[in-house]
Amino acid sequence: MKTLKKHWKWAALAAVIVLLIAIFTTWRPVKNPATQEYIIGSGNCRGQVDTERFLAVDDAFAIGADEDGWAVFKNPARALRALRAHYGEGIWAVQKELYMLPLTPYTYNLYGMYGWQLTEGTEEELRQARFVTGFVDIYENSFQ
């Protein structure tokens, strides 16, 4: 009976450690949160991001600007979930043709570099892949 109690405590400790590791390896803090509205040509806003194009798809793609004026998603985690929901075919096309890992907060940069290069797939998949690449151009600003 004493041995069983001793092992139970070690199992509980191991479970807590595994849970903490999972939390700290999957949680990615936003380094550059939106601090202002992104309006081309106003204030210190940089670039030429067509915010209306993103908002026409889903309000989860709301874009603001960080303190340096770079376009960032106001809620990057929500924007990534919306991208997966609306542009799954494009994500899959990039992943399949270029042998990429699944799109996550840790692998997104590869999709930004290679999404434009697709040569196979339907016209819709190619269109979606181009949107994914444009998305990543903004998404990555939240973490740099």
Image: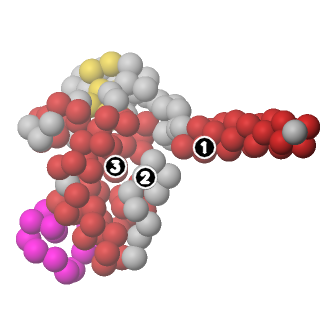
Secondary structure, mark 1, is: helix
Which of disc 3 and disc 2 is earlier in sequence?
2
Which amino acid type corresponds to the residue marked 2 in the rendered image? Answer: Thr
Rendered view: 102 above or below 69: below
Relative placement, left or right, of 63 versus 127 is: right
Q: CA distance from mark 1 to mark 3?
A: 27 Å
Who's the residue at 26% across and 55% down the image? 132
Q: Are marks 1 and 3 in contact (CB under 8 Å)?
A: no
Secondary structure, mark 3, is: helix
- Quarter of the image holding residue 23? top right
Q: CA distance from mark 2 to mark 1?
A: 15 Å
Which amino acid type corresponds to the residue marked 3 in the rendered image? Answer: Asp
Return the residue at label 1.
22
Return the residue at label 3.
137
User: What percent of the width, then of the height, locates residue 85?
Assistant: 21, 48
Magenta span contains residue 118: yes
Specify the farthest residue to the right: 2
Q: Nearer the viewer, mark 2 or mark 3?
A: 2
Q: Please say whether residue 135 is visible from this viewpoint.
A: yes
Who's the residue at 38% across and 19% down the image? 35
Return the residue at label 2.
104
